[in-house]
């Protein structure tokens, strides 16, 4: 799953005591006396009534005699069951002999006498509702050229399979599936496996049965149905297809090309060929909770993550589609073929899928320099990991609510950063060999963390397990303090904390593979285990190449000397120095202007990817200001930094780094718009109104003009968004509308994003963009209404939205309001995963009240 988390980490405010968080000491797992071997599942959806009926014939292995069979079921009505139907004398289990435990999402079937050990068949009849939020089983409505349409889909990670069928809904319990669905004639039905047969029930209805699947975890099950089209090709003996709503096949062609190339690369890299006969990439006519889902053989994508319109999509869209297609396809091995035993090992899925999407892009599209861009991913992990009480990668999870909160920046981005560090330390060939051995040893099975890393250590002949243990079993970001000695540098370990150097907390210790490079010289490698002296002459970069998961704190005099060497540094070290300076400055370890100083020393001709990151530094500082003279001076200075970069990009030949040039140009234009550059705003309005320029220029113009929209322009955009029937175009327009800075539009925006007016499932992302533009109004106008039916937000999604909106604030009074929201709306076992917002509010407040003063002094010295 490719989660779009903006903030999700286990943390609490350093200045306010965390509430007591009672946690179960044992996992909420089903009894082990009965396990499933095979599900024969028949589902009959009724989209008009938003309900479905089902029959699930489960082949069971009873390990010891029992008079009760307990399985997972949520929001399902079990109408009755029969044990051993068709094999032995059947035993009827009426509905009144089935008890439900809603707190644990369980149903227990009470038998008249104990069932004997061995294989049995339990057939359950049941029914349930088809929802509108995008978890469980749901429909997504949209307009087509032929009128209104609905698509049926499922999205089950981590624990929503129990909303589709009664069964064993735990990642380590695998079974095979045979699926049958009744589908209207003329509609396409989809599941994990190819269609085995289709029988006409009537002129209007077909019964579609799919081939039996391999053993797989319940959360990977998929069922879909709708007015769809499929384009496909054969790759290494596999039928690879892209499935879209009717009329969108041209928008699926790019994803099909990339999927075909990726499957061939992955087959070779993993050393175990993709084992299913088909692989479908399916586009939703809207957005999914979690963005996309790696169902085995039937990956389900939000529309923006799979569709690429040659007429209107941008280079950034192109690279985003590749990133998410490659991420979900990597899961077909890490997650689907080999599955984590329990949710505390989720990073075995998500960290590796994040790492693979970076690796795959560098293999197939080296001109994108995705490995360099990945420094931003890794920074997300470090930011989350530095907050008070941040959780370890290997996080104890006992409940379904806690599992839902585990999809965060630590799991994904710290996980990928640690894997990158270990892969670099092992070497590419050894790392790949280790992964291949792991895949062969555990195919179709379930694993824990040590199953992988013990193989890696055996291959590498290095203490990989010890390094991995240090970074996965304890939270926190190593801080390497640098000091000068007569012989060179002295390095000492500490812990970096977002709350600042005086925040305290438990001492941590890591074994860190580290590179130190004299500027212009040859780097040397060491294993930093506590402290070390490094003989080096002159200035040197610590963590050269930025492979180590750590931050580096130089004495200010040494940092100032390094500034003059910024133009000669590699792009990755320019980004590393800038990101460390920003984090250290915001948290009080160093002057708050240090990051701005790095940006000021970047040459306009620096690698465009570096300037993309620099734009984030500048716009982030701008967002922290209130209106006034200080902000006006900062904006003028930031504009002076950006304009020469655009001049360089405009003069470069189209063939030289064209992909990243286009993305950087768009990002810098949008930054100038945010900074209030009058020339940029006038140009944007002219470009958008005339419809001139490339797709990227049109998108940037829309972004800039919408943010600064007056009442007339806002109405024009809103009318255009409401008029278009295409969900992709509609979302592009609404994404722009919700960033409007004029507070007068806030109520209109709130009503839009909390309604069915926007494409299905897009409410969450739109609320996030609204909160970034208007954090206080978003809190006031939308958080009390998150549960409204029109918003279509699952309760767990509501918690994420409230957390994201709260995290945008800088006023400390928001902390008490947020705690009140959690107490009223969020179960205790899910609250820990939401407390990171409090640390973000405190950090935002520190930037606004302390860091900006230092930035103002810097700007004044530069003639601002």
Image (cartoon, grey):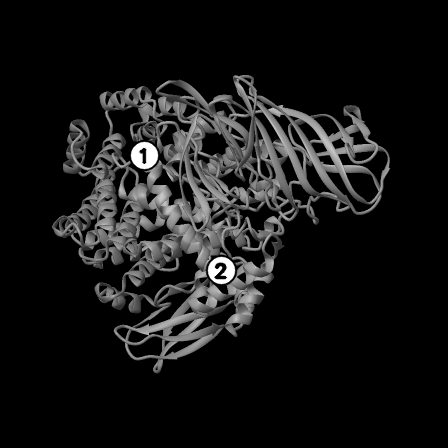
Q: Is residue 253 visible?
A: yes
Tell me the element at label 2. Answer: loop
In this rendering, position of residue 176 left or right of residue 531: right
Q: Earlier in the sequence, mark 2 or mark 1?
A: 1
CB contact under 8 Å: marks 2 and 1: no
Q: CA distance from mark 2 to mark 1?
A: 33 Å
Estimate how packed mark 1 is, as few (under 14), some (14 to 19) or many (20 or more) residues with alpha carbons within 10 Å.
few
Nearer the observer, 640 or 473:
473
Query: Residue beneath label 1, please?
Result: 250
Q: Which residue is found at the position 55% from the left and 52% from the top?
A: 391
Nearer the observer, 185 or 506:
185
Estimate how packed mark 2 is, as few (under 14), some (14 to 19) or many (20 or more) residues with alpha carbons within 10 Å.
some
Q: Which residue is found at the position 29% from the left and 19% from the top?
A: 719
Query: Residue beneath label 2, please?
Result: 271
Q: Which residue is found at the position 25% from the left and 46% from the top?
A: 663
Furthest residue in direction bottom, as rendered: 487
Tell me the element at label 1. Answer: helix
In this rendering, position of residue 809 left or right of residue 824: left
Q: How many marks?
A: 2
In this rendering, position of residue 338 left or right of residue 55: left
> Where residue 534 appears, x then y in whole percent?
39, 78
Q: Is residue 385 visible?
A: no
In the image, residue 754 sits, relative to residue 533, either above or below, namely above
> Where residue 269 appears, x then y in whole percent?
44, 59
Q: Quadrant of residue 580?
A: bottom left
Furthest residue in direction left, as rendered: 651
In this rendering, position of residue 184 left or right of residue 711: right
In the image, residue 540 sits, relative to residue 817, either above or below, namely below
Q: Quadrant of residue 823?
A: top right
> Where residue 161 appears, x then y in whole percent?
60, 36
In the image, residue 853 sits, relative to residue 437, either above or below, namely above
* Label of residue 160 in the image: none
């Amino acid at each position: 799953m490719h989660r779009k988390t903006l903030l999700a980490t286990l943390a609490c405010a350093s200045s306010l005591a965390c509430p007591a968080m009672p946690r179960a000491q044992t996992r909420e797992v089903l009894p082990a006396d009965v396990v499933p071997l095979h599900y024969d599942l028949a589902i009959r959806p009724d989209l008009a009534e938003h309900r479905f009926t089902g029959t699930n014939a489960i082949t069971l292995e009873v390990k010891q005699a029992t008079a009760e069979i307990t399985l997972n079921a949520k929001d399902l009505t079990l109408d009755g069951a029969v044990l051993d139907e068709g094999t032995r004398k059947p035993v009827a289990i009426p509905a009144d002999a089935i008890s439900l435990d809603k707190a644990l999402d369980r149903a227990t079937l009470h038998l008249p006498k104990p069932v004997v050990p061995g294989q049995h068949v339990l057939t359950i009849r049941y029914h349930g509702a088809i929802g509108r939020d995008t978890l469980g089983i749901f429909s997504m409505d949209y307009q087509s050229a032929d009128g209104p349409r609905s698509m049926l889909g499922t999205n089950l990670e981590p624990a929503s399979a129990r909303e589709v069928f009664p069964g064993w809904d735990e990642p380590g319990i695998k079974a095979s599936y045979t699926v049958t669905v009744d589908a209207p004639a003329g509609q396409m039905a989809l599941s994990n496996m190819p269609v085995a047969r289709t029988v006409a029930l009537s002129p209007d209805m077909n019964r579609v049965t799919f081939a039996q699947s391999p053993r797989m975890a319940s959360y990977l099950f998929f069922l879909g149905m709708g007015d769809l089209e499929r384009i496909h090709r054969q790759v290494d003996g596999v039928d690879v297809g892209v499935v879209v709503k009717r009329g969108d096949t041209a928008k699926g062609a790019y994803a099909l090309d990339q999927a075909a190339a990726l499957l061939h690369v992955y087959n070779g890299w993993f050393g175990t060929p993709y084992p299913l006969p088909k692989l479908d990439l399916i586009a939703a006519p809207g957005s999914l909770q979690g963005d996309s889902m790696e169902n085995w053989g039937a990956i389900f994508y939000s529309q923006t993550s799979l569709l690429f319109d040659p007429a209107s999509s941008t280079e950034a869209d192109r690279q985003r589609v590749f990133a998410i297609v490659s991420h979900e396809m990597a899961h077909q091995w890490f997650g689907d073929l080999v599955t984590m035993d329990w949710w505390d090992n989720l990073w075995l899925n998500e960290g590796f899928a994040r790492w693979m999407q970076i690796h795959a892009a560098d293999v197939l599209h080296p001109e994108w320099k995705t490995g360099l861009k990945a420094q931003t991913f890794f920074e997300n992990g470090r930011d989350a990991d530095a907050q008070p009480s941040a959780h370890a990668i290997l996080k104890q999870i006992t409940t379904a609510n806690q599992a839902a909160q585990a999809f965060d920046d630590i799991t994904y981005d710290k996980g990928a950063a640690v894997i990158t560090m270990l892969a670099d330390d092992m070497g590419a060939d050894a790392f790949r060999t280790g992964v291949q051995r792991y895949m062969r040893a555990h195919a179709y099975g379930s694993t824990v963390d040590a199953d992988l890393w013990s193989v890696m250590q055996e291959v590498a002949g290095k203490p990989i397990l010890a390094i991995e243990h240090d970074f996965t079993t304890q939270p926190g970001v190593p801080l390497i303090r640098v000091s000068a000695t007569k012989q060179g540098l002295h390095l000492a370990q500490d812990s970096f904390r977002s709350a600042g150097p005086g925040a305290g907390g438990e001492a941590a210790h890591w074994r860190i593979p580290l590179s130190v490079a004299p500027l212009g010289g040859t780097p040397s490698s060491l294993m930093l285990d506590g402290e070390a002296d490094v003989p080096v002459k002159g200035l040197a970069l610590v963590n050269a190449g930025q492979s180590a998961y750590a931050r580096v704190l130089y004495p200010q005099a040494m940092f100032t000397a390094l500034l003059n060497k910024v133009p000669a540094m590699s792009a990755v070290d320019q980004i590393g120095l800038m990101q460390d300076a920003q984090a250290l400055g915001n948290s009080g370890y160093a002057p708050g202007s240090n990051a701005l100083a790095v940006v000021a020393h970047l040459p306009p001709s620096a690698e465009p990817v570096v300037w993309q990151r620099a734009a984030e530094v500048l716009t982030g500082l701008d967002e922290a200001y209130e209106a006034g003279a200080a902000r006006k001076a900062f904006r003028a200075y930031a504009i002076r930094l950006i304009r020469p970069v655009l001049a360089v990009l405009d003069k470069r030949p189209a063939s030289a780094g064209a992909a990243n040039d286009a993305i950087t140009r768009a990002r810098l234009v949008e930054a100038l718009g945010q900074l209030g550059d009058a020339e940029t705003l006038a140009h944007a309005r002219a470009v958008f109104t005339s419809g001139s320029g490339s797709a990227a220029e049109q998108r940037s113009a829309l972004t800039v003009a919408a943010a600064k929209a007056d009442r007339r322009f806002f109405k024009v955009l809103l009318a255009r968004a409401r008029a278009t029937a295409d969900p992709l175009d509609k979302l592009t327009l609404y994404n722009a509308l919700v960033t409007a800075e004029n507070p007068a539009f806030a109520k209109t925006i709130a009503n839009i994003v909390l309604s069915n007016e926007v494409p299905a499932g897009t409410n969450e992302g739109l609320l996030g963009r609204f909160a970034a533009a208007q954090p206080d109004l978003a809190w006031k106008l939308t958080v009390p209404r998150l549960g409204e039916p029109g918003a279509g937000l699952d309760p767990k999604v509501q918690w994420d939205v409230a957390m994201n909106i709260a995290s945008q604030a800088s006023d400390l009074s928001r902390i008490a309001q947020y705690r009140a929201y959690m107490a009223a709306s969020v179960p205790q076992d899910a609250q820990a995963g939401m407390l990171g917002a409090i640390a973000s509010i405190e950090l935002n407040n520190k930037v606004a009240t302390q860091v900006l003063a230092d930035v103002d002094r810097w700007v004044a010295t530069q003639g601002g």
